[in-house]
């Protein structure tokens, strides 16, 4: 079993929709949780990170962590065509070594 | 914006040839990571360094892969001899100093094709 599981999609939504992306994990030692966005032929870029459980909001993006269920989510409100990318979750126990999901491909249709 | 720089961006070569990929981490960052990305496996950690010392290279096939940091501004990943199954995108990332959590910043990768 992989440390981090992520549904690869692909996910296709109309512009303006709310998008929900999710990851599950098995290692209860994880305490740092990240979401990266990766455009085609580019490297992943850090979108958001949270420490431990709870919610974090940044503009149209909200990250949620439920450590009791070992489940994290990224919500995108009012999705835009520019949000079309692959979204990777990542987790870390001590801050340096990250464990990545395989990524969910998202397309937002104008 | 400070960026991680990787060269070359693309490499096509024949099986058996040596391949060298280079990475310039963000100035001041003291951790460097090498990843391989494929559709099937996603991002796999190959090796990482802190203060130029290798901390973990357990993800790397030792018989053909080697990673080094000759100095603080250069990290290299070599494959010798290369095989078709090495075809993938190789990413370098660097992280800053101080505190327990340091986000990793990625370069745009080297797209490697072994024929």
Image (cartoon, helix red, strand yellow):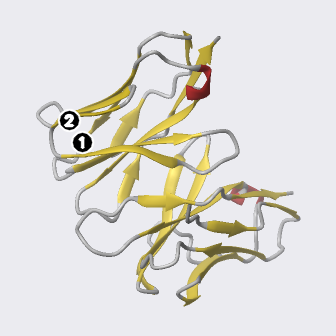
* Residue matched to label 2: A70
Above or below, A43 against A37 in this view is below
- For the residue labelled by badge 1, is the local secondary structure a helix, a strand or a loop? loop
Instruction: Indicate the position of residue A85 as horizontal and vertical percent values.
Output: 58, 32
**Vertical position of residue B24 compared to residue B90: above or below:** below
Q: Earlier in the sequence, mark 1 or mark 2?
A: 1
Q: Is mark 2 on a helix, strand or loop?
A: loop
The residue sitting at 42% across, 79% down in the picture is: B30
- Which quadrant, please, contains the N terminus of chain A? top left
Q: Mark 1 points at which residue?
A: A26
Tell whether label 2 touches label 1 (CB within 8 Å): yes
The answer to whether residue A35 is visible is: yes
Residue at 27 percent of width and 74 percent of height? B98
Chain identifier of the residue bearing label 2 in the image: A
Quadrant position of residue B56: bottom left
Q: In the figure, is residue A87 to the left or right of B13?
A: left
């Amino acid at each position: 079993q992989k440390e981090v599981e992520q549904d690869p999609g692909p996910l296709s939504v109309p512009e303006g929709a709310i998008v929900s992306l999710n990851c599950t994990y098995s290692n209860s030692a994880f305490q740092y949780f990240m979401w990266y966005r990766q455009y085609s032929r580019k490297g992943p870029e850090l979108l958001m990170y949270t420490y431990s459980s709870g919610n974090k909001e940044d503009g149209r993006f909200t990250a949620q962590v439920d450590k009791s269920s070992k489940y994290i989510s990224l919500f995108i409100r009012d999705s835009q065509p520019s949000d079309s990318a692959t979204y990777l979750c990542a987790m870390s126990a001590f801050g340096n070594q990250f464990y990545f999901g395989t990524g969910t491909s998202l397309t937002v249709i104008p | 914006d400070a960026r991680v720089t990787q060269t070359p961006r693309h490499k096509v070569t024949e099986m058996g040839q040596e391949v060298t990929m280079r990475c310039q981490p963000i100035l001041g960052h003291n951790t460097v990571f090498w990843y391989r990305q494929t559709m099937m496996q996603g991002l796999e950690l190959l090796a990482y360094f802190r203060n130029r010392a290798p901390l973990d290279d357990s993800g790397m096939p030792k018989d053909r892969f080697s990673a080094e940091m000759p100095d603080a501004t250069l990290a290299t990943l070599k494959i010798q001899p290369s095989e078709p199954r090495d075809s993938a995108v190789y990413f370098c990332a660097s992280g800053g100093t101080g505190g327990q959590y340091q986000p990793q910043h990625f370069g745009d990768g080297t797209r490697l094709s072994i024929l």
